[in-house]
Image (tube, rainbow, N blue to C red):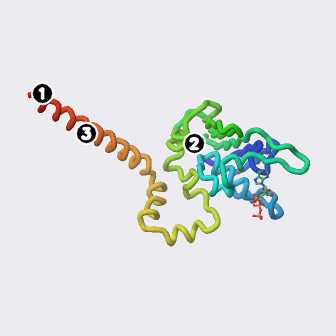
Amino acid sequence: MYLKRLDMSGFKSFADRTQMEFVPGITAVVGPNGSGKSNVTDGIRWVLGEQSAKSLRGSKMEDVIFAGSESRKPVGYCEVAMTFDNSEHKLPLDYTEVTVTRRVYRSGDSEYLLNKQTCRLRDIHELFMDTGIGKDAYSMIGQGKIDEILSSKSEDRRAIFEEAAGIVKYKTRKKEAEKKLEGTEQNLTRIRDLIHELH
Ligand code: ATP
């Protein structure tokens, strides 16, 4: 599985629809200061569900929408689509290409799509769990990330190995099941109390 294509439209400095094709191996993005190189990685984190405007170097989520320039009007919405080669079916979907899309309007409305079908952010999280792909996963190594990993708490470091080992999915399901179990225990206690009162 590899990143095949990135399409951006109205995202930050990419006012027009812009397509970047990637091939297996190394792709380097070069350009003068302020030309939008970091906006490309911001786009990748954003489409994978980044919710923090600050970590996308803005103050509110609307800042990701092209704000206009001397020669161009602002746009009303932005969209980023990331396409993966899935010919080996590493992602558990029947498709040989998987495209994740995120769209947001100035009104605040937003949506996520998986191969053009509307989905929840949760579906995207679950799909990429244990693949190393995600807004915070190890496939994105930003500036200062290595230092952060080395100086972080051992439990946080452990999370990186758990993702690589492919057990995050099971830990998440276990946590959800434990939560449900706890809810059921509480319901049972309430029912026992009621039965006791009725006797
Ligand atoms: P450097 O090499 O200095 O790190 P860079 O190539 O990584 O620069 P970016 O930081 O990705 O550049 O891009 C910054 C540019 O993006 C700035 O010119 C900024 O005005 C523009 N920009 C960011 N958000 C928007 C927006 N919402 N609308 C229009 N332009 C934007």
Tag 3: residue type?
Gln
Q: Which residue is mark 2?
A: 88
Indicate whether 70 appears above or below 75: below
Kind of element beneath mark 2: loop
Where is residue 172? Give x, y as percent.
41, 47
Q: Is residue 188 left or right of residue 107?
A: left
Rendered residue at 16%/35% (across/down): 193
Q: Which residue is mark 1?
A: 198
The label nearer to you, 3 versus 2, is 3
Rendered residue at 56%/71% (across/down): 147
Q: Which mark identifies residue 186? A: 3
Where is residue 165? Give x, y as percent.
45, 55
| In-front residue for pair 127/118 | 118
For marks 1 and 3, give the CA distance: 19 Å
Marks 1 and 3: CB-CB under 8 Å? no
Q: Is residue 95 left or right of residue 180?
A: right
Tag 2: residue type?
Glu
Q: Answer with the quadrant where ligand 1 appears in the image.
A: bottom right
Rendered residue at 25%/35% (across/down): 187
Residue at the extreme right of the image, as rendered: 71
Where is residue 43? Give x, y as percent.
69, 50
| In-front residue for pair 170/73 | 73
Marks 1 and 2: CB-CB under 8 Å? no
For marks 1 and 2, give the CA distance: 61 Å
Which of the two labelled residues, at mark 1 and mark 2, occupies the earlier sequence position? Answer: 2
Kind of element beneath mark 1: helix
